[in-house]
Every structure is written in structure tokens, then in C-alpha cells.
Amino acid sequence: MVQSQTSPDIILHSGRVITVDPADSIQQAIAIRGDRITAVGSDAAVTALAGPGTTSLNLRGRTVIPGIVDIHAHLDREGLKSVYPSLAGLRSIPEILARIRELAAAQAPGEWVVTMPIGDPPNYADLPQNLAEGRYPNRQELDRVAPNNPVYIKGIWTPWNVPPSVSIANSAALQLAGVGRHTAAPDSSVTIERDESGEPTGVFVDTGRYPSVEFTLMAAVPRFTPAQRVAALKESMRLYNSVGTTGAYEGHGVAPEVLQTYKAVWDAGEMTVRANLTVSPNWRSVSHAAREMESWGHSVSGAGFGDGMLRVSGCFIQYGGNRYTAQARSAQLPYTGWAGFIQSYNSPARFRRLVRLAAQHNWRVNTLVRETLEEVLAVFEEVDREFPLKGRRWTLAHVLHTSAAQLERIRNLGLLVETIPLTELWLRGSRYLASPGLAATAAAHRDYLAQEVDFSFGTDNKPYNPFATLWAAVARRERTSSEVLGPTQRLTRLEALRAFTRGGAYFSFDESRLGSLEPGKLADLAVLSGDFENMPEDDIPELRSLLTLVGGKTVYQAADF
């Protein structure tokens, strides 16, 4: 314990403070002055520091943890989900139609009615079989309840679950979009469902990894406005704070329209989540990328440029991808829809040239490797021979299967591993039910520890509560069967918490300031709603924060605390 010469502003005592310090010590109390932790220790030692201006809070045995740093947060998305009315909980076409009728009645004739997808967030699973009719409504049914309004039921953002993304338009919406009997699908990944006479039913089925219908056939549908994005980002921060998240690293990249949104919230002094953003570039060519890196790359080189609440560093570079999807979505820039990033396509040769340029200009590279780890590692090793990567903290996102040899190469290059266990093990883990050996190599967290590979977790905003993701790393249970996948890879609760706190801080070059509750570090912490260490394992996903501090300031306080 380190004692300050001046009295603390705040003392939290009579709790269980999980410090996540190098010794994994558990303390009773913590003292804060300004934005820093000044002491951590026993109740007697820390409360003795109180002065006449100190606010003391009795935790009554509650658990305190360092603030969560979500390293694949897609923070901007959560608030956007409230822009459009929800259809959650509806289980039949009549229920859906009744909701559309209600929404249309509140609009003037001719005004759009746009909703969230059919199904239940965050994953919108098991459709359409969980509707009583086993099918989606069609345009004629929507026409009957909204004869004077264009109606569009959005399809899912496919990373929330898996393709397809099914969206539905009524006749007025199809007419405004120019979709009719003779309209052709823009790509084999898109199906315009038709009735027996050849007319569109209003149902679009999009099997692309990232859906394109709203960027092509239904580009007439109203889009998120800048004002909606700003309001949504502030709401997102409130929600992430409510579950103990105090920091975010956006390694998948952030497009200009979202960078502008963050800047607007930062300008207003309303940031409540520390955000480290990665540039999502729209480079038209390698020479274009070279010019941009040369002209303004200094501002995002190394650990980046910014302050304690908003920083921009490095870039996301796609390996491979889908050429059609990239072209279709890029044609509508600056609009990016749910993505928030620019979808690109890079051949292996172009990826290699872009990565070498980034290393030359000291731009940190982030890339997805779920299915391309071996190819990306080979490129990084080639670049490393000319521009050593150790210490640059280049990031591999959506890491799934790894071998011992690959992990050794990752460690030797100083790469960071980002993993999303809730998606890979719980949501999409059914593929491993008959392949226990393969399951043991998926999100192999204990192997990461054994190989001393730096890693952390991302929620991918599905859901935003980090404790669901943490639980997935601890329990490793599949959604439909509850079977444990790769039991030898299970983490303890404290190991998983360390990955989400100290591990997350390391991604942002912030390990000296964040990630643990130690004197001298920033006072980012959360008081939890339950006993994290001892509660039933299956209750972990329901944990939330009762009190969240960022830099010693309250950014969230539950009504019942």
C-alpha cells in the first residue's frame, strides 16, 4: 500500500477489491484522489487516510474490479439499435403485422416505417423456424397493415449471428427503391424472392458475410444521420459503463463517419469510455496508401495520437475479403451502416505491399485471421525480416484455431491475439460437438498462457456485456447442448478477468496506467452486482455494474445502489 500525503477524495471500503496486480492480491479498500488510485489495502489502513473532505462509501462486501477494456467493442453500434423500433419477442406473423400497423399509424402518409430485424437480440437466432408459420411475412401482408407507408424490416447484421440476413419490404418501399419484376440480383449472394408469377415477394435473402442489400437494391431506405450517430454513441457509452466497461480498443477499424462522431462527443467533453480507435482506410491503390501514410501518418504512428479519453492509432488492413461486397458497400461511402468500418478487398500481393508500407511508416497493423492465420503469419514474418515487429503490438483479430508452432511464431513476432469466445464457442460452437479434438484448438486460451502469448477478449457487441464473453472463456459451453468444448482450455475466473483488464490495457499501450487497481494508476473501476468469485457459474453473464468510475469520476450508478 502506498500512502498519499494528502487525503483522498473517495474511499471505497468494506469490500472485496480484486486488484489484478502481479500477485493477484485481494484487498478490502481503495482510496482515490483526483483521477488516480492513491492506496489499496485493508480497511484499517486505507480508512485511516480519510480527511475532512473525503467521501467514504461502504461497499457492504461487494466486489470491485478494474474497469473492463473491450478490445473488439464496436462501441458505436449499441445505441444505434434504439434508433429503429424493435420486433423482439414477436413469435408469429400476425404479431409482427400488428406491430407494423401500430408503427404506421404513428407516421404521416408516405413516411417510412423502418424496424429492427425480426427475432431477439443480441443474436437473432433460430429464424424463421421460431415463428409460428415457419416463414417471414411478405409484401402483401405488410401492405394490408401499412397501405400508405413504405415499410422495411431490416435484416440482421450478419456478424450478430451467421448469414443469411433476411430483410422485407412492402410494395411502396419496393417502388421507391425501383425493385420490380425485372430487377436482377446484384450478386449470387443476394436472392430476390419471387412468387409464382415472378413478382418480388418483398423478401430479400443475403448470404454475404457482410450484407449488401441496403447498399444496392434497397439503398432508398433511410440511413443513420450524423445526429443519430452522436446520440447513439453517447447512449452506447452509458450502456457499456453500466456493465463495467471503461475502455475500448477498436481494432476492426473505424470509418470517417464514425471518427467524426467520436470527435463530436469528445469535443463536447462527454466521453465516458476511453476509446482507442484504429483507422479504417479507403485506399484506392497501394500508391494512394503510400501518399496518405507519408502525408499524415505521423498522427497515427506507434501508440497513436490523442489524450486519455480518445486516441487514434494504426490501421486495419483486410487480408482477402469479398470483392463484390467491398465494391457494393464502398460505393455508398461515407455511409457504412451497422459496420462502422470500410469493407475492403486486398489480394495477397496487395496485402503484402500494404503491410510493408505500414511497417515502414510505423503504422500498427490490425487484421482478421479467423480463416487466414497461416497466410497472414507468413506475410508478417517476411515484413519482420526488414522491419522488426517486436514491440509494435500488431494485432491478430478473431483468432480461432491455432497450433503450438503458430503460437510460438506469434510470440516471437510480438503479436497480440484477440479472441471472441462467446461467438466461437457458445453461439457457433455446434460444429465442434462431433470433433472434440478440433474444439480443443478453438480459442485455445490456456495454450496462449502456456506459450506466453499476449491476448485479450472482445465482445464484438453481441452482446455488449463483457461478462457473457468472460463466462464463455470460463465455461466453454455450446448454446444448443450445453456441452463443454475443449475442457482443457477453460480459464479460471481470475485468469479471464486478467485478460479483460490488464490484457485489454496492453492492447492500447496503457498497461502502466490501466488494467489493475494499484497506487498510481488511473481510477477506472466497477463495483459489481454479484460475488464474481463465488457465484454460480451460469449467473456470470448476468453480472452488471452498480457503480462505474472512469478517472475517479462516476460515469454510471445504478438506481438500486
Image (cartoon, rainbow, N blue to C red):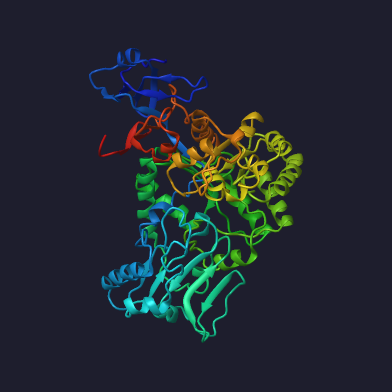
In this view, 87 is above or below 464: below
Q: Is residue 470 left or right of residue 355?
A: left
Residue 518 placement: quadrant: top left
Residue 67 placement: quadrant: top left
Q: Residue at x 39, y 60 (%)?
A: 226
Residue 325 placement: quadrant: bottom right
Residue 141 rendering spot, x and y as whole percentages: 38, 77
Furthest residue toward bottom: 197
Residue 531 rendering spot, x and y as whole percentages: 38, 29
Q: How many marks?
A: 0
Residue 314 rendering spot, x and y as whole percentages: 58, 46
Quarter of the image containing the C terminus? top left
In this view, 261 is above or below 270: below
Decide which of 64, 163 is in the foreground and name it.
Answer: 163
Decide which of 21, 459 is in the foreground and name it.
Answer: 459
Regarding residue 179, the answer to whether it shows in the image is no
